[in-house]
Image (cartoon, rainbow, N blue to C red):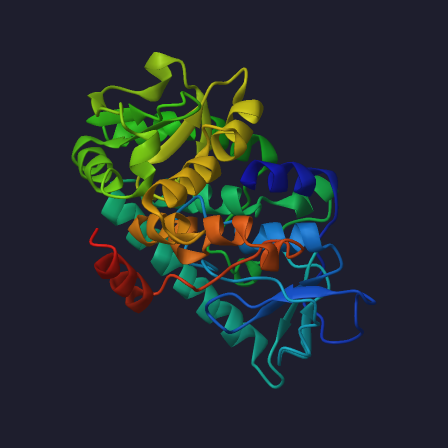
């Protein structure tokens, strides 16, 4: 999704200066408030807005909106009536709003400081250079410098709420995105991997982490598609999986998911929806164990780690529940610590 956002951003839009007048879009509108609660983003395209909620998820700024979902309401209806920027300086397709009476400069500075802190903390804990982490976060979020592309000059440091002090152009972002897995591997030479039994994907990460992850996964319903999986030292690229599908896996966020470069679109679809895919395996697990429908998805999601979409956003649950069928970028807070502890105890896992 991050790459898609980058391509969309290359083709369109420019940023404007700070403004505090006129409503930019007519109905329908869609909006969301990130976890900092200090700002609101609003736009007319529900696909773009839904993508924005998870734009940063694959990188160092994954804490920006981990469980946020778009609302079919205006920012004013959500309590953020003050228009700050008709075209946000990261997401040109959205307008930026704040609460009535909020000091724009102070609020932008606060959000920026929070994001810089989050990026630096990620870099320090993962052994990356801080500047690389900033570029990674900006590029995955789609915050490259479209002003320069549009020929309208640079935006100020204060407006860069995502935390990068300088311009990053599109070619630089593409270099980071396409070379990201190699960059991560260089920082963590003890790379290990394991494969799904259906052969569609490969996961890799640090040896100790991958060993613990596979052991934990085999405790629950995911074991059905990992019966033959073994942790092997080496890289997924060495066994034919070159396409970085997720830089932070939806279940195991410290691991990366890769697929075959030539067939990754079909393989990723099949990994989820084929007869040997996740949802089929979960349904078969329910039938075999005599459980109520959806129990295996609940158990599997609870056994996924915090920081991944399956646990933070209830991704498997929203994808399989008719209640969420028409909601783009759907998110559920179903998998709380309390819920998961009770469920895992109930089923003795």
- Locate residue 156, reporting x and y percent: 58, 58
Residue drawn at 24 percent across, 31 percent down: 188
Left or right for 293, reference 152: left
Count of numbered badges drawn on the protein: 0
Q: Quadrant of residue 30?
A: bottom right
Return the residue found at the far bottom. 101
Left or right for 230, reference 26: left
- Locate residue 100, reporting x and y percent: 63, 84
Is 106 in front, or is 215? 215
Residue drawn at 55 percent across, 73 percent down: 105
Q: Quadrant of residue 155?
A: bottom right
Is 58 in front, or is 312? 312
On screen, residue 229 above or below 21 = above
Residue drawn at 41 percent across, 38 percent down: 284
On-image quarter of the N terminus: top right
Residue drawn at 44 percent across, 36 percent down: 278
- Locate residue 11, reporting x and y percent: 73, 38
On screen, residue 96 above or below 272 = below
- Locate residue 27, reporting x and y percent: 82, 67
For the question of whether residue 187 can be seen, the reply is yes
């Amino acid at each position: 999704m991050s790459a898609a956002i980058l391509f969309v951003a290359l083709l369109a839009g420019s940023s404007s200066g700070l403004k505090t007048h006129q409503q930019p879009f007519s109905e329908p509108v869609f909006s969301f408030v990130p976890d900092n609660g200090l700002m609101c983003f609003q736009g007319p395209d529900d696909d773009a807005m839904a993508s924005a909620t998870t734009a940063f998820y694959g990188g160092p700024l994954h804490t920006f909106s981990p469980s946020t979902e778009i609302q079919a309401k205006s920012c004013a209806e959500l309590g953020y009536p003050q228009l700050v920027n008709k075209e946000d300086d990261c997401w040109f397709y959205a307008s930026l709003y704040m609460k009535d009476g909020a000091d724009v400069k102070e609020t932008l500075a606060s959000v920026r400081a929070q994001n810089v802190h989050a990026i630096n903390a990620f870099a320090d804990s993962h052994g990356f250079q801080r500047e690389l982490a900033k570029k990674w976060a900006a590029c995955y979020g789609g915050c490259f410098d479209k002003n320069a592309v549009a020929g309208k000059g640079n935006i100020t440091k204060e407006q860069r709420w995502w935390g990068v002090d300088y311009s990053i152009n599109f070619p630089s972002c593409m270099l980071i995105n396409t070379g990201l897995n190699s960059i991560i591997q260089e920082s963590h030479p003890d790379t290990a991997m394991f494969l799904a039994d259906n052969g569609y994907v490969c996961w890799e990460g640090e040896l100790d982490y991958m060993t613990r992850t596979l052991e934990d996964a085999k405790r629950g319903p995911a074991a059905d598609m990992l019966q033959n999986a073994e942790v092997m030292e080496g890289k997924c690229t060495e066994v034919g999986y070159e396409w970085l599908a997720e830089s932070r896996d939806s279940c195991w966020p410290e691991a990366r998911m890769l697929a075959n470069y030539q067939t990754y679109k079909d393989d990723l679809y099949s990994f989820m929806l084929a007869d040997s895919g996740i949802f089929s395996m979960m349904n078969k697990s329910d039938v075999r164990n005599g459980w109520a429908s959806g129990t295996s998805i609940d158990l599997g999601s609870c056994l996924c780690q915090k920081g991944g979409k399956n646990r933070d956003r209830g991704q498997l649950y929203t994808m399989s529940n008719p209640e969420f069928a028409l909601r783009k970028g759907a998110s559920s807070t179903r998998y709380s610590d309390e819920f998961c502890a009770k469920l895992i105890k109930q089923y003795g896992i």
